Amino acid sequence: MLAGAIVLLIALIMGSEYVSSRKFRKNYLEKIYQSYGTVSDRVYKEGEMEHIRMYYLKHLSEQVIDDITWNDLNMDHIYRKINVSCSAAGDEYLYYRLRTPIYDEAQMQHEESQISFFMEHEEERHKAQRALLSLGRMGKYSIYEYLENLDTLGERRNMKYALSNLLLAVSVGIMFLSLPVGIVALMAVLCHNFVGYFKEYKQIEPYITSFRYISRLLDSADQMGRTKIDGMEREQERLRECHKQMRGFIRNAYLIVFTDKGNGNPLGVVLDYVRMIFYLDLIQFNNALRAVRGHLTEIDEMITMMGQIETAIVIGSYRSSLQGEYCIPTIHYGQHADRHMEIEQLYHPLLADPVKNSITVSGGVLLTGSNASGKSTFLRAVAVNAILAQTIHTCLAKRYEAPILRIYSSMALKDDLVGGQSYYMVEIRSIKRIMDQVKLAEAEQCYVLCFVDEVLRGTNTVERIAASTQIMKMLAADHALCFAATHDVELTKLLEQEYDNYHFEERIEENDIFFPYKLMKGPATTRNAIALLKMLEYDEQITTEAEAMAERFLTSGNWQTGEEKN
């Protein structure tokens, strides 16, 4: 009677947990379905982006968006706005994709077909999202951080566990010959097993999380392999093959993957003691470890393919969130593509109410204009859209046409206090790397798209203008498209043969300043620095003398104070 009641209680507890988990999963899935086409509201934990980078770092290629350019363009923020993934594979692969432009036309067409498929087929998209939700996330670390450290576990063998279990059987046998002696022997063996278990479990515990993730990966890969996705038959077949090759892992990892220690479930508590006494999960861990070490390539392939599928869904969701305010870029591949870029109604993805601009160029662009007029934002808008065009095949513009480009910037630099480098040293190193890429592009017959904001701002005026002129001429080479912003109006004359001049301007009305943020042809003809001093009610003598000095310089080319002139 009592035993029946206990069994019924355990069944009720387990049933309640099952129903609760099913309800939670159903509600969460519905939330994922409803969030398609909306902007991500996910809050990232401190340091989380460092772990999301791991897939990218493990799959580095020669031509990627380097750290300087990525940080200049605030690409972490753009990534967060785009990312609506529900799995770690999706998180990490989307980051990798945004930092790894596609230079092959066939690959771009293949990935575009995946994006289009999920945008047009809701039922298949929901099936894929269910599989991806089963995969989920790792927690604090990336799976690649765990896999990288597997070697630290060394060779793990099950012989000592077998010997401990043999001693346990012997002690039980002794009890039939001498109960007191048998009890003492049994207690000694149990104490030995418990102490040894906790000591070793502490070593392997961090890796159990990764094994659970691998198990979920296999389950999700199995689900995805059975979902009809046009154009991805090859990937799905490979997912099925990888799953088949890792059946040994599933069999050997069952106890450590599908049970939760200390969860309060009465049956779970009993199983915890059984595992500890007989080292069952340690034995299975060692078997599973051998399976993982022998199939690292298959694990990486499954993560890649699952990440690709979720990234296609995420890109489609991002396009839908733009409500038609985007285009599929026209990208010209091959060495014979012209150095020509044409963008209509371009805007920046992080602006809530952006002003759109258009530009057509076949060479360098030199931007001038007042402070806060929009120069840097325009440079970033062009750069970001060039990256999005060659990574997620999506541009925030009415039209985008350009050749394949290698994209570099030097815009938001800072002093390197740790390395002991001044701003000027950091700046010239940054620009030098772009110049090296331009030379490489000439040798490889491709194009570099580069962006420089206030070239050589870290040095004096005379040397800045002289050096800037020669650097900018170098960046106007036949295999480069350079966009640069400057306050040095002298450069508009010195570089008028190499660069097309554009500007942004301001309007001062009723003691207030307004910025229309519209790109205009020609060099800037207005200035606002002194006007802003006036608006903040600086001493009138300061602003009057400053205006007079500026006018005299623009007329004569020399800096003179009023006293010197007299």
Image (cartoon, rainbow, N blue to C red):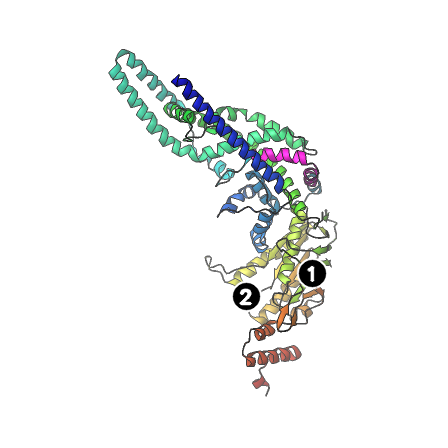
Q: Is residue 440 visible?
A: no
Q: Which is nearer the N-term, disc 1 or disc 2? A: 1
Does residue 470 lie above or below 227 as drawn?
A: below
Q: Where is residue 507 in the image (x, y as percent from the top left)?
A: 66, 70
Residue at far bottom of view: 566
Q: Position of residue 258 (x, y in %)?
A: 48, 28
Quick one: label 1, few (<14), some, or many (20+) residues within 10 Å? many
Q: Would you say the residues marked 1 and 2 are in contact, meaning their CB atoms lie under 8 Å apart?
A: no
Please tell me how many numbered marks the rendered image carries: 2
Residue 3 visible somewhere in the drawing: yes
- Residue 139 position (above or below residue 491): above
Q: Is mark 2 on a helix, strand or loop?
A: loop
Residue 386 on image: x %, y %: 66, 52
Does the magenta-highlighted stretch encompass residue 348? no
Q: Residue 458 carries which label?
A: 2
Q: Mark 1 points at which residue?
A: 364
Quadrant of the image containing the C terminus: bottom right
Residue type at mark 1: give it. Gly
Residue placed most toward the observer, 526 or 340: 526
Q: Residues within 10 Å of mark 2 (few under 14, many from 20)?
A: some
| Residue 272, quarter of picture | top left
Q: Which residue is drawn at 48% across and 41% down?
A: 141
Q: Look at the image and give the residue range highlighted in magenta.
A: 111-134
**Image vertical order of residue 556 relative to residue 126, above or below:** below
Left or right, residue 545 beside residue 168 = right
The answer to whether residue 536 is above or below residue 434 is below
Q: In which quarter of the image is the N terminus?
A: top left
Q: Which residue lies furthest to the top in this view?
A: 177
Q: Which residue is drawn at 57% across and 42% down?
A: 91
The amino acid at mark 2 is Gly
Q: Measure the alpha-carbon separation of dots 1 and 2.
A: 23 Å
Q: Is mark 1 on a helix, strand or loop?
A: strand
